[in-house]
């Protein structure tokens, strides 16, 4: 019999440190040299969990309808950060304005999809799989992209923070979900596999996972030792700051990581939205600014693209609890040394609402198509399952 304590330790590693869809395995591997062209090839996804309020993230600051719809939540014009086209960013985003000034930050306006669904679970599934609203897919859009470019790696994707695979869900993808790369590396190499475990067919799967964890852990631990602590010393001491710092460590260590997913929440601001929304946007902006500075120091800023996304925006009109309810379209942020910065697309007009909600002006799959082509040179139509017109010139 395997001792209960050791069984629980192994089970925690197998089920918590590594989320493996059936048929997957972690194999030895390391980060190879970046593309010779110098283009970015790592996508850093940041999920704004819960539905980010786009109208106070990028506000039509001079539109009287904005203040009529939001008598208590509308941003003060004196505090908001003007960015052109009578639009202004939330003041909490000020830490990221160096990126904006340098042309390293793009704001994609009015992003959504037809027949929007206001369910958290269904809508994020649509974003994760790039499906139509009336179609259910079982594989993430990143999973399909990685299938189109198979390569032996220690892991295909790293999921930091909230353990939700999202766009890397599906068969055949090695997705490592961990709260801290160093902790994962140490834990993965710390537990020995007893002889009785190897002979127990009931625990074969745990044994196999433990073996692959040890291989991946050895590889990651060796690489992380080369990253000086000073490189991430100035990151904010927040959950978002820690995730960005861990992502930077993985990249700086040379760990092969075509996709790294972070998460920030909760943006589900039905009640007393103002302080919560400001804190979340401020957390993101401060962490992004620190990440850019460290990535530039490490010579990595041109090698990575950061994309934010959320399951939906919020309603234009505030509710009776000084919050906002589930809505539709919202802006996304895109950042990186190879990103064409500025305002991209069209802000949804407040005088043309449908069912009291914003109408999207950019399909999120157009953004995905731009990244699939710009990052990995893939045929976006094949990955997304239908022809999609990318956003022109989004990535250099």
Image: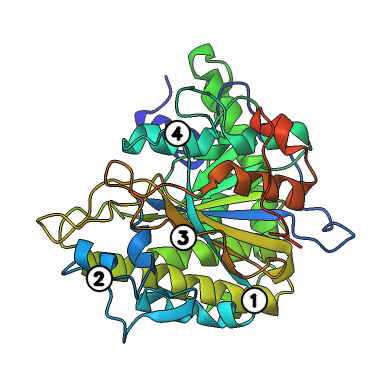
Q: Position of residue 72 (x, y in %)?
A: 16, 69
Q: Quadrant of residue 295?
A: bottom right
Residue displayed at 23% across by 55% down:
269
| Label 2 neighbour load within 10 Å: few <14, some 14-19, many 20+ | some
On the image, numbered disc 3 is attached to which residue? 347
Quarter location, residue 102: bottom right
N-terminal-most mark, 2 or 3:
2
Q: CA distance from mark 4 to mark 3?
A: 25 Å
Indicate which disc, 4 or 2, sits on the residue closer to the N terminus: 2
Kindly state the secondary structure of the residue where label 1 is placed.
loop
Residue 141 is situated, as x and y percent measured from the top left of the image, at: 60, 36
Question: Going by the picture, which residue comes out furthest to the left?
Answer: 320
Determine if residue 229 is in view.
Answer: no
Q: Return the residue at label 2.
A: 74
x and y, in percent, of residue 324 in the image = 22, 54
Residue furthest to the right in view is 36
Looking at the image, tell me whether mark 4 or mark 3 is earlier in sequence order.
4
Specify whether 364 is left or right of 360: right
Question: What's the CA distance linking mark 4 and mark 2?
Answer: 30 Å
Marks 2 and 3, how far apart at CA: 16 Å
| Percent x, y of residue 224 | 65, 62
Quadrant of the rendering where the C terminus is positioned: bottom right
Identify which residue, 39 or 55, lies in the foreground. 55
From the viewer's perspective, is the residue at label 4 or at label 2 nearer? 2
Q: Are marks 1 and 4 in contact (CB under 8 Å)?
A: no
Q: Do tag 1 and tag 2 residues touch (Cβ < 8 Å)?
A: no
Q: Which mark is residue 125?
A: 4
Answer above or below: position of 110 versus 292.
above
Query: Which residue matches tag 1?
Result: 103
Q: From the image, state whether disc 1 or disc 2 is nearer to you.
A: 2
**Mark number, residue 305:** none
């Amino acid at each position: 019999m395997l001792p209960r304590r050791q069984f629980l330790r192994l089970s925690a590693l197998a089920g918590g440190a590594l989320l493996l869809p059936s048929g997957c395995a972690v194999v030895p591997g390391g980060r190879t040299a970046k593309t010779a062209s110098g283009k970015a090839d790592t996508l850093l996804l940041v999920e704004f969990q819960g539905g980010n309020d786009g109208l106070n993230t990028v506000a039509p600051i001079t539109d009287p309808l904005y203040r009529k719809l939001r008598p208590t939540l509308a941003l003060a014009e004196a505090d908001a950060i003007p960015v052109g086209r009578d639009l202004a960013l939330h003041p909490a985003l000020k830490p990221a304005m160096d990126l904006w000034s340098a042309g390293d930050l793009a704001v994609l306006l009015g992003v959504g999809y037809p027949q929007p669904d206001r369910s958290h679970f269904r809508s994020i599934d649509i974003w994760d799989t790039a499906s139509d609203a009336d179609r259910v897919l079982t594989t993430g859009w990143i999973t399909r992209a990685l299938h189109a470019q198979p390569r032996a790696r220690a892991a295909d994707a790293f999921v930091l923070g909230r353990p939700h695979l999202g766009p890397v869900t599906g068969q055949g993808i090695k997705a490592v979900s961990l709260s801290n790369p160093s902790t994962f590396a140490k834990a993965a190499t710390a537990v020995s596999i007893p002889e009785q475990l190897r002979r127990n067919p009931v625990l074969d799967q745990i044994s196999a996972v433990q073996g692959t964890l040890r291989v991946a852990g050895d590889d990651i631990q060796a690489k992380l030792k080369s990253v000086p602590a000073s490189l991430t010393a100035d990151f904010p001491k927040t959950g978002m700051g820690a995730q960005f710092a861990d992502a930077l460590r993985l990249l700086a260590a040379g760990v092969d990581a075509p996709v790294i997913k972070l998460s920030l929440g909760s943006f589900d601001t039905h009640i007393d939205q103002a302080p919560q929304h400001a804190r979340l946007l401020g957390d993101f902006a401060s962490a992004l600014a620190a990440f850019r500075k460290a990535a530039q120091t490490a010579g990595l800023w041109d090698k990575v693209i950061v994309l934010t996304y959320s399951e939906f925006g919020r309603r234009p009109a505030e509710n009776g609890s000084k919050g906002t309810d589930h809505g539709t379209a919202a802006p996304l942020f895109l950042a990186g040394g190879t990103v064409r910065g500025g305002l991209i697309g069209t802000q949804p007009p407040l005088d043309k609402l449908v069912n009291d909600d914003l109408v999207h002006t950019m399909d999120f799959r157009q953004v995905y198509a731009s990244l699939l082509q710009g990052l990995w040179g893939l045929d976006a139509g094949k990955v997304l399952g239908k022809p999609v017109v990318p956003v022109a010139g989004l990535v250099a």
